[in-house]
Image (tube, rainbow, N blue to C red):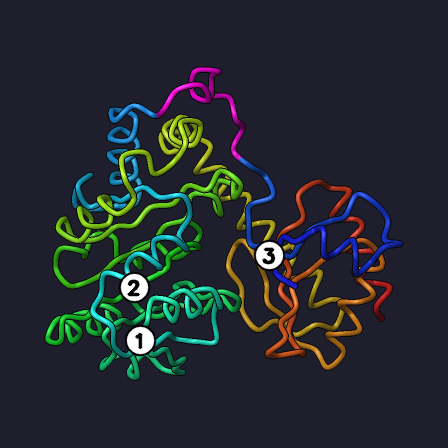
Amino acid sequence: MHGGDLGAARSLFPNAPEPIVDLSTGVNPHPYPIVATSAEDFARLPEPAALSQVSALASDFYGAPSAENIVVAPGSQILVALMADLIPKGRAAILGPTYAEHARVVALAGHEVRTVATPAELNDAALAVVVNPNNPDGCLTPRDDLKSIAERSRAHGGLLIVDEAFMDVGPEGETLCGCVEEAPIAALRSFGKFFGLAGLRLSFAVTNRDFAARLRARLGPWPVSGPALAIGTVALQDSDWIDSTRSMLRVNAERLKSLLQGAGLTLVGMTDLFCLVTSSFAQEAFMKLGEAGIVVRRFDENQQILRFGLPGKETEWRRLNDALQALS
């Protein structure tokens, strides 16, 4: 079951108490307050000036060299698909295990895709993909290692895609957004994860100016909606909310970690938006939690791990605590 699919969760757990507590995603459960839209944002096509403004703000926020390095898109997945289509078809390598959609869309673009276990195995790929911090385990590949891989890929016209969807809560200084003119790198940033607005479908690619221009041409003049631009424009400038939210998420992630370990689950890795745990009774835990109305992410490829996103309301924390205590 994919994260965030409440319809599937209700089918699997028809007698679960409502409301369902959805911990199956890595999205901030405290979304940015939507106060920036107007009826005109919905009624008219977005103005080019609005797209330029949000590009400039994203450039500042993510540390890109300039607004010309920014590509605005309706989610990161379409960006990966477009990039894979623009790169000459060849061998693609994805550092895994990781988010499965990248391998799927790269294969659909005509590449021969393999999942590799170490960064060194990415060196000979025409297209290399790394999720950093990784989903679902939060593992971080050092910035210098990634820059070296990108430098090597230059020799054979390759590209390194680094999905930094969770870098907004990652270590400072590890992003590659500032390096995109130095080597063939495209960094992906997902507005919806940190700002808690996944349904807005707003993402950014940060890459060299020439490749950015090619991506923008593929996406066309109205890549995202007017409401998405309006909300993104306000949120990216709200430094008080950004700083306080980062602090709050850090505290809540430690609280979640403590609850999970107290229930006998072994921590594998984490970011400030999710924890990955392992247990010999993971499948039993998944079912019992679901029957209690707590939906978490399980993985067909490894049935001993579960990923828990952060609860939001205090009532959700209490329900999670009660459900975890009932496991023992």
Residue 84: give its label.
Answer: 2
Name the spot of residue 205 as percent of width and height, x first.
Answer: 30, 50
Q: Residue furthest top?
A: 39
Name the spot of residue 269 as percent of width and height, x first.
Answer: 54, 69
Residue type at tag 3: Glu
Q: Give the crowd class for mark 3: few <14, some 14-19, many >=20 residues within 10 Å.
A: some
Check the image and report above or below for 190 versus 288.
Answer: above
Residue type at tag 2: Ala
Element under disc 1: strand
Instruction: Write the residue at 25% across / 40% down.
Output: 59
Start and end of the magenta stretch?
A: 32-45
Pointer 3 residue: 254
CA–CA distance in space, label 2 to label 1: 9 Å
Q: Is residue 38 magenta?
A: yes
The answer to which quarter of the image holds residue 288 is bottom right
Name the spot of residue 130 as percent of width and height, x first.
Answer: 36, 68
Pointer 1 residue: 92
